Image (cartoon, helix red, strand yellow):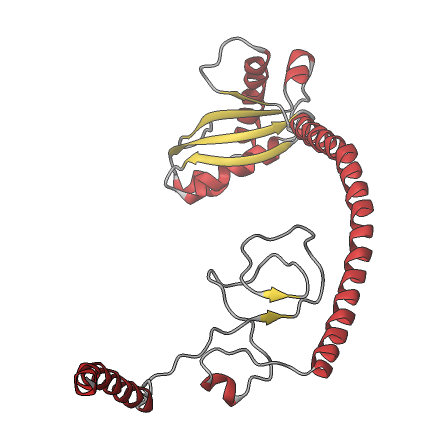
Amino acid sequence: MKTQISRKLRMPLSVIIALCLHTSVIFAISFSFTPTNPKLPPALDVIIVQSKQSDEKIKDADYLANTSHEGGGEFDTNKRKKSLFQSFEDTKMNGIAQIQSQQQIKQQQQKKTKLITAQQADKKIQSSDKPEQNKSLNNSQQITQPELTIARLTAEINKDIQDYSKRPRKQFVHARTKNTPAAAYMHNWIKRVEFMGNKHYPTEIRKKNLKGSLILVVAIKSDGKVLEVRIKKKSGINLLDQAARNIVYQSSPFAAFTGELKKNSDILYITRTWQFTSNTFR
């Protein structure tokens, strides 16, 4: 009877003992894996903001700071604010921000606070002066600009009128001119010139028996004095050209303008053909 019981228990006991042995072996053995590139935990960015600029809550913040602050700067993408005293270790830690001491932070805050206060004071002074200056300038411009424009245009018009009024009234007359006061004056002028020319006919021209013709333009002022003598077409003989000039000046002064001629003319230009024959001038 005992032999049968022991045989029946032998198999379960063997299984239990085997399980215990395997379990002890499994727990006794441990495996460890060393990663080739250990990953560091993500860095936490903490930024010290010197002044509070926004009271609104920002939903998607890029960094942690002591106060809410809207981003700004010269970069299109988010950039970590770097310390002025960045160490060599910081560059080898792949982006882990360097923690500054409380004393350094306090000193920087004091310096920046003083600088910001000074700049704000200057801006307030300048901004308080600018409105008054701009207001006075705008008022003066609004008042004086139209007046200056009108004054300038008036001065230009007056100058043009004065210049035009100062310009001498000129009239031109020649052999084919109709019966006008200017033509009548020219007729009397020709008589005087021919008389004085034949009276003072140049002796040298008579001796050399020089002949020729020229076109002369004589400008006479309203008082009868000669303003200008100009040869329009030369005779080809300098002695004849010069003699014609001399005859004009010898015949002057001529009669002063009268009547309608004086009313309408300040200068009369007479164009006339001069002819020298052997002994006469006409």
247 lies left or right of 5: right
Q: Position of residue 108 (x, y in %)?
A: 71, 77
Residue 67: image location, x then y, percent:
68, 62
Q: Taking 67 as reference, is 144 left or right?
A: right
| Count of marks placed on residues | 0
Judge by depth and name the residue closer to the eye, 51 or 275. 51
Please report the residue visible at 80 percent of the width from the left and 47 percent of the height from the top: 133
Q: Of residues 235 and 19, which is closer to you in this image? A: 19
Q: Nearer the viewer, residue 119 or 7?
A: 7
The image quadrant of residue 235 is top left
Q: Position of residue 238 (x, y in %)?
A: 42, 44
Q: Is residue 282 visible?
A: no
Q: Is residue 275 left or right of residue 104?
A: left
Say if residue 21 shows up in the picture. yes
Q: Is residue 244 above or below residue 51?
A: above
Front one among 82 and 154: 82
Answer above or below: position of 260 versus 72.
above
Rendered view: 121 above or below 115:
above
The residue at the point 56 percent across, 58 percent down is 61
Residue displayed at 68% across by 17% down: 262
Q: Please state the horizontal and vertical placement of residue 172, each as a whole percent of the image.
A: 53, 22
Image quadrant occupied by the N terminus: bottom left
Residue farthest toward the top in the current orientation of the protein = 179
- What residue do we see at 38% from left, 83% from top? 38
Q: Is residue 15 left or right of residue 177?
A: left
Please identify the quarter of the rendering in which residue 241 is found: top left
